[in-house]
Amino acid sequence: MQKKIALVTGANKGIGLEICRQLIANDIHVLMACRDLTKGEKAQNKLATQLTDVKKHSTLVQLDVTNKNDVQALATTWCQEGIDILVNNAGISRGVAKTVITESEEDARLTLETNFWGAWRLSRLCLAHMKATGYGRIVNISSGHGTYAKLDRHNPGYRLSKLALNGLTKMLDDEVKTFDNILINAMTPGWVRTHLGGLRANRSVEEGADTAVWLCLNDDQQIRGGLYKDREIFPW
Ligand code: NDP
């Protein structure tokens, strides 16, 4: 049987890189999508210290999720080849110290462009192949901060981008409701020690990536159209 192919965005560090490591360890061929290939090469070399034959089991792909030309290039190469699993992980957070009144529109827009529009763009592309084969997994890396329960005035671009990503997850699931084997979910990794999460965070990248990888490999058709944390449903 041919290996499944997964595309992971924001693959050069943090949770994205750990998702790549765990997927490769599970015999998936991983397209490590990075906006800067030099950083991607360093990340791939780092994986090579932990796993064997990393360069055989992964491919670096240049992809800035906000750049329509990059996305188009992907459409004419890998999307035609077929992406079985898409992990929308790339994310930024620019308004941590800002509120709904003080965050600049520019920062909020860039955050939505990356965290939400990037995921929408790539999901549309990948779904064409998934619908043709009847198989697909999409995992959106969201955040508890994107749930209505956590919607306060802080970091508005980020919270709204993840709220929209959660909404997109549910809508995409509806789009594929007649397909038993196309399963689309969102997950929240908790507070993880990364560039975005900071050093004080209480979780490791291994813990942060676990549920995302579980959803990528999931074969339970009841697990669809939801938000998950620690392999359990998490309220929107
Ligand atoms: P990091 O900052 O460590 O990594 C973010 C990744 O996204 C980097 O590879 C970065 O690339 C990439 N990226 C940013 N913008 C773009 C873009 N326009 N195109 C392509 N790639 C891009 O963050 P985390 O690993 O912590 O975050 C991963 C995901 O997890 C995010 O979606 C985040 O919102 C989510 N999350 C994280 C939490 C945490 O506590 N860490 C909590 C909840 C959710 P580059 O290196 O080039 O900047």
Image (cartoon, helix red, strand yellow):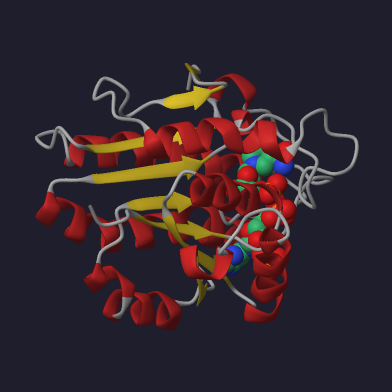
Q: Quadrant of ligand 1?
A: bottom right
The reply, left or right, for residue 178 in relation to residue 48 is left
Judge whether 211 appears above or below 197 on screen.
above
Residue 136 in the image: state x and y as whole percent: 26, 46
| 203 and 67: which is toward the camera | 203
Residue 3 falls in image quadrant: bottom left
For the question of whether residue 164 can be seen, the reply is no
Residue 219 in the image: state x and y as whole percent: 29, 29
The reply, left or right, for residue 24 in relation to residue 18 is left
For the point 66% across and 75% down, which residue is it?
A: 41
The reply, left or right, for residue 66 in relation to residue 69 is right
Residue 154 falls in image quadrant: top right
For the point 20% across and 35% down, which residue is it?
A: 174
Residue 8 in the image: state x and y as whole percent: 49, 57
For the point 63% across and 24% down, which residue is it?
A: 150
Kindly give the residue lying farthest to the front in the view shown: 52
Kindly give the residue lying farthest to the right in the view shown: 200
Residue 185 in the image: state x and y as whole percent: 38, 34
Residue 36 falls in image quadrant: bottom right
Q: How many marks?
A: 0
For the question of whether residue 232 can be seen, the reply is yes
